[in-house]
Amino acid sequence: MTASPHDGVNLSISDETASAEADDRTVDPAPNPHATAEQVEAARSDTKLAQVLYHDWEAETYDDKWSISYDERCIDYARGRFDQAVSGDASAQSDLPYGRALELGCGTGFFLLNLMQAGIADKGSVTDLSPGMVKVALRNAGHLGLDVDGRVADAETIPYDDDTFDLVVGHAVLHHIPDVEQSLREVLRVLKPGGRFVFAGEPTTVGNFYARWLGRITWETTTRVTKLPFLESWRKPQEELDESSRAAALEAVVDLHTFDPADLESIALSAGAERVQANTEEFAAALLGWPVRTFEAAVPSGKLGWNWAKFAFGGWKTLSWVDENVLQHVVPRGLFYNVMITGTKPAPRA
């Protein structure tokens, strides 16, 4: 059976995957994009409620906020993250394309949908704790004509059978999960023997420290300076700034972890993975990227134009090249902003 990806309650299941796993399935909850003050207060002491409220809140604007697209720019970016994560393991490339892939904590589908367009996988499944994110991810998949089904799901109890997927991916998701090791055990359970996982976009402990400070300083400076009368047109309406501040308060609750690369490797090994490898990226690029993103979020959309976009993307690409070709050879990996991890499910011993 196939339901409309625009439905948000009856999420799409492709014909070939609508098997026994859907027989006892309950109806997924509908998105809740406007959390009340009482819900926000309750979420301060309930991590998973905070995850749902924050990501439902962000779902419809998330792609714009983070300049996410499903064209060549982000296809190349997603494929680059995959290739960098698995660098040094030739079998990861020889297995392409993977048959069926799962994205854990899919958000709007950025990572999996762009990887599918890059030829990494033929079919996909998206899961997220946020109904709003699953709805948008499926809508994006429908617009792209990709074979994708979706479930509202907790990453610590993935609602798929053992040995279902050839590949599991995620981008900026592990730091939201309370028990990362338990989640990776679940990832290994639903992978086929020899199957691979790739998680990218996770904050390192040191990188998160300087990124947060850069973001905070940029936000405070921008919102203060735009109070000046001759800069009023650069100031967002106060209600939008207040809403952003409430969202930021929830964000502080949903961001649970930062990672040292070696510690993340240890967690994956403890979960039962083999051929585990962590790589890092973005040092100089992060020092530019975080102030740029924060400034874009603090001013009205439409004020910044094509020249700004060209500067922001061009600057990030240039500094990413410096990171990859120069700084990665001299800067300790723990100082970079992003860490990515890959590993495989052990195959049966003969």
Image (cartoon, grey):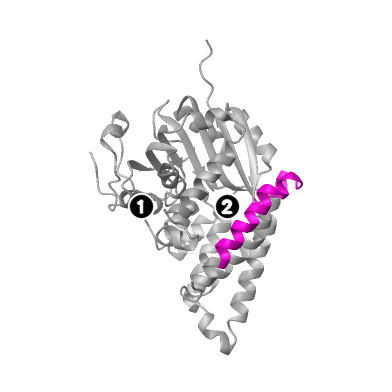
Q: Position of residue 200 (x, y in %)?
A: 56, 44
Residue at x 71% of width, y 44% of height:
333
Residue at x 30% of width, y 45% of height:
11
Magenta stretch: residue 331 in it?
yes
Query: Which residue is under mark 1?
Result: 140
Q: Amino acid at mark 1?
A: Asn
Crowd class of label 2 (few under 14; some 14 to 19; many from 20; radius 10 Å): some
Q: Nearer the viewer, residue 151 or 317?
A: 317
Q: From the viewer's perspective, is residue 64 above or below residue 349?
A: below
Compared across the picture, whether 41 is left or right of 127 comes to: right
Q: Nearer the viewer, residue 262 or 88?
A: 88
Q: Quadrant of the N terminus?
A: top left
Q: Position of residue 39 (x, y in %)?
A: 45, 59
Q: Position of residue 119 (x, y in %)?
A: 42, 39
Q: From the viewer's perspective, is residue 175 above or below residue 298?
A: above
Q: Is residue 66 visible?
A: yes
Q: Please give the range of residues in magenta.
A: 311-337
Magenta stretch: residue 274 in it?
no
Q: Nearer the viewer, residue 287 or 12?
A: 287
Total number of numbered discs in the rendering: 2
Q: Amino acid at mark 2?
A: Asp
Q: Which mark is residue 255?
A: 2
